[in-house]
Image: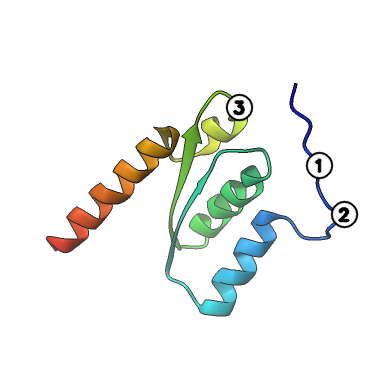
Amino acid sequence: MVIEILTPLTINKGEALRRYVQQHKLQGVLFAGDDRTDLYAIQTLAQLRQSGMNVLSVGVQHSDTPQELLEQADIVVQDVAGMAQLLHEIVERLSHT
């Protein structure tokens, strides 16, 4: 059984991400998440994409990852090792451009 305890904040990861993007005038965002609170950020990325921003949302799958997060993510990797491999592949491609 999993019990998630959250502080009574008026901001979630999606709103925090939106503010960070605006504050730093970012042109693109890659976000990886694996739990229910990350779903807000993935949903925010979908909104940012609609406004023209380059975004990639990654669901990091493990035994406790919510199915809804995996369904809404652009891509899904397996565990931390899969995320590390994805980042390695991105760096390799960027270094050849």
Question: Which of 95 and 18 lies nearest the eye of the viewer?
Answer: 95
Q: Secondary structure at mark 2?
A: loop
Q: Judge whether 82 appears above or below 92 on screen.
A: above
Q: Secondary structure at mark 3?
A: loop
Q: Residue at x 60, y 54 (%)?
A: 44
* Residue 2, position as x, y percentages in the image: 74, 27
Separation (CA) of disc 1 from disc 2: 10 Å
Residue 64 position by quadrant: top right
Q: Residue at x 36, y 36 (%)?
A: 82
60 left or right of 19 in image: left
Task: Give residue 8's mark.
Answer: 2
Task: Give residue 64's mark.
Answer: 3
- Foreground mark, 1 or 2? 1
For label 1, the crowd category at 10 Å Cα-Cα, with few meaning under 14, some 14 to 19 and many 20 or more, is few
Separation (CA) of disc 2 from disc 3: 23 Å
Give whichever of discs 3 and 1 has the lower sequence position.
1
Quadrant of image for the C terminus: bottom left
Amino acid at the residue labelled 3: Asp
* Residue 85, position as x, y percentages in the image: 30, 42
Amino acid at the residue labelled 2: Pro
- Most distant residue in the right direction: 8
Task: Give the residue pinned by disc 1.
Answer: 5
6 left or right of 17 in image: right
For label 3, the crowd category at 10 Å Cα-Cα, with few meaning under 14, some 14 to 19 and many 20 or more, is few
